Image (cartoon, rainbow, N blue to C red):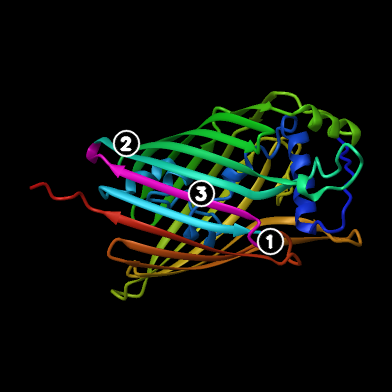
Amino acid sequence: MPFKISLLGSNLSMKYFILSLVLYQFICLRAQAPKYSNEFLHLGVGANAFAMGNAVVATTNDVSSGYWNPAGLTGATEWLQVSAMHSEYFAGIAKYDYLGISHSIGKKGVLGFSFLRFGVDDIPNTTQLIDNDGRINYDNITTFTAGDYAFMGSYAKSMAIPGMSLGGTVKVIHRRVGDFAKSWGFGLDIGLKYQLHSHWRFGIVARDASSTFNAWIFNLSQDMQQVFISTGNEIPTNGLELSLPRFITGVAYTHAIGKDKGFNILTEFDIDATTDGMRNTLLKSNTFSLDPHLGVQLSFKEIVHVRGGVSSIQQFQAIDGTKEWGLQPNLGLGIGIKGFNLDYAFTRLGAAEAGYYTHIFSLKFKLSQPNKK
């Protein structure tokens, strides 16, 4: 669907101009295109996972498992675990936040809760920039927020088969674009983990196993509708948006280095299989696409962790029309001391020539049950 808009006034910054265009594109396309729906749910959580290229579904065993693989929550044996993360994208224009809590209930299993927000704040609404007399009036510019929110409840339990665990996550999704549009959605993730001896671990997750849906409601004033008509854009209507299932499989191998030195190395290889058609991934078809990613971690006595990973292997097209392959490198460091973990990741978004570098920090606390007097 073509998108056209005419904006006057050179005093508006390029940042505001671009965000205004993004908003209109978002409103016009959101209720129609099923591909890339709820993509904010696939960014990842935890600096440790980002540093490993998000290759963690087989090894995740803490509070963040409610997001990555709910079956891994069985590793959060403490009475309470709390994790938080904040990151910013595109020079701070977009902000991404995560909060996770898990609670062990003994042999009955582990409960978890996760909250995600990805938002762009203070977007200028320029639809009333030109008043009824045809004059440019900057006082008519207001601001709004475009935010995506996810609330996740998880449960995991160890199975009768030694080393195997099963878990599930129920997701409630809320998306809002100012007062113009909003949606509510529901979905389900199912995960399985299996550990073979002390070296091999396997994991599989079915995200949006039931096909997550979002019901969109648009609330456009008469003036807003007139702007859509005058700029040649279709007026969006209420409708449903589906997120088709995505399957992630992972295999990990852990090996100690030396004898009684406290060093060990962990390597995990994951493959994301999407079912919503062709995507820009390493392997793709008209039915599904495969996106492999790899992570490596070197640890010393669970105190210091050095991590690296490779993800998002894609083909990019340059301005001159030539195509080349690129990938997303990831690096990170983690420190753990007596129930407290601080993790850092340094990653790049987009093609090799795009200077979108991001610093990500996350915290994790492990708390024992308070003594009862």
Q: Is 96 contained in the magenta span?
A: yes
Q: Is 226 contained in the magenta span?
A: no
Residue 257 visible to the viewer: yes
Expressed as whole percent of the image width and height from the top left, the position of residue 193 reads 41, 43
Circle on res. 159: 2
Q: Seen from this angle, which residue lies furthest left?
A: 373
Distance, label 3 to label 2, CA atoms, is 19 Å
User: Mark 3–mark 2 contact, CB under 8 Å?
Assistant: no
Question: Disc 3 marks which residue?
Answer: 250
Expressed as whole percent of the image width and height from the top left, the position of residue 275 reads 66, 35
Q: Secondary structure beneath disc 1? A: strand
Q: Residue at x 63, y 60 (%)?
A: 92
Distance, label 3 to label 1, CA atoms, is 19 Å
Q: Amino acid at mark 1?
A: Leu
Q: Is residue 38 above or below residue 311?
A: above
Q: Residue at x 26, y 54 (%)?
A: 367
Q: Is residue 34 above or below residue 118?
A: above
Q: Secondary structure beneath disc 2? A: loop
Circle on res. 327: 1
Q: Which residues are magenta?
A: 90-107
